Amino acid sequence: MRAAGLLEQCIPARDASDAEIERVHAPRYLELVERETEAATSARYLSTGDTVIDASSLRAARRAAGGALAAVETSAAGGEAVFALVRPPGHHAEPAQGMGFCLFNNVAIAARAYQAMRAADEPRVLIADFDYHHGNGTEAVAGEGVSYFSTHAYPAYPGTGSRSYRRGADLVVNVPLPVGGVATETFIALWEELLPQVARVVRPHMLIVSAGFDYVAGDSVGDLGVGVEAATPLAAAIRRVAAEYCNGAVAYVLEGGYDLDALTRSIASIADVSDAAQSPAPLADPKAIPSDLRESMRELLRIPQGSP
């Protein structure tokens, strides 16, 4: 990425504080992570789930959450796209449980921090997640002004995300896809069609993206069979929503993606779309979306049959 000139404008990350983490995670869980990482003289599993830790893991997780915080703060202040290039990922981490490579839920921590910054305005946040895997931890946090929209393979790990529903005034929109994959055009059409529909209902002040690139064909941990070129129209759809509702503000936070070439090319595509004079028009044919999925989304969002 540095060789491609993608890291010329860098924002320093910082460590997330206990107070920032505890807007999402239970204090006893943070204490557990502190205790078990300090005692980890070699690599071992966190006692709450399938996440390997060592003595450096808490430091890395604090910095990853802090990178997401810095991205949201900068994006909100400047009305621009910012990408938090962080690891470990976070969207599987639930309030009292780490799992799936994740210790702290980076996007949820950033969403609650944004709400705290603008508490007087009762801000609404939409978290959009295109990782191969469902963000069970983010869904667990949704509500109280935070909505969640996810496409993911089902019933792949973690086996959640089979239904959509309203949580108070907020939405949880899950789009389960076949584990065997979907056509690239179908994946693009889903995002071009459904993200604006979700945003029309939520009307978010801030858009945060769980950017997991393990949906790309050939990924060793995911693989939905989707071409790496999908990142460009996905970023364009996200940019259009951010421009309409969020004054251009969108913070991408890295989740999965384990092929370095696909990861780099995808992030480069997002940077190109973000820097372009205008966002490309939608590319995919809406008819590529299966009819049963379209009908279920209409019902959830209460969109009339004749709506585009």
Image (cartoon, grey):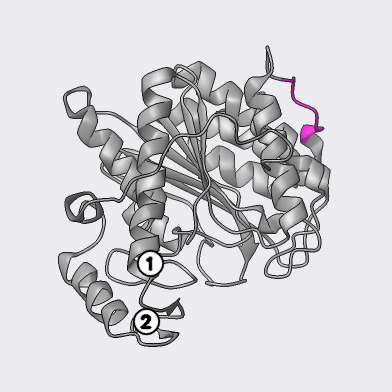
217 sits left or right of 22 in the view: right
Residue 58, placed above or below residue 278: below
Q: Residues within 10 Å of mark 2 (few under 14, many from 20)?
A: many
Say whether residue 281 is magenta: yes
Q: Position of residue 22 (x, y in %)?
A: 20, 56
- Which quadrant does the N terminus fall into? top right
Residue drawn 79% across and 52% down? Answer: 226
Which residue is disc 2 drawn over? 46
Which residue is disc 1 drawn over? 103
Residue 145, placed above or below residue 245: below
Say whether residue 209 is magenta: no
Q: Please identify the quarter of the rendering in which residue 157 is found.
A: bottom right
Residue drawn 38% across and 71% down? Answer: 56
Q: Position of residue 143 (x, y in %)?
A: 30, 46
Q: Residues within 10 Å of mark 1 (few under 14, many from 20)?
A: many
Tell me the tag on residue 171: none
3D distance between C-alphas at marks 2 and 1: 9 Å
Q: Label the magenta part by its dominant secondary structure.
A: loop
Residue 306, placed above or below residue 265: above
Q: Which residues are magenta?
A: 280-286
Mark 2 or mark 1: which comes first in sequence?
2
Q: Amino acid at mark 2?
A: Leu
Query: Tag 1, which secondary structure?
Result: loop
> 292 or 106: which is nearer to us?
106
> 240 or 2: which is nearer to us?
2
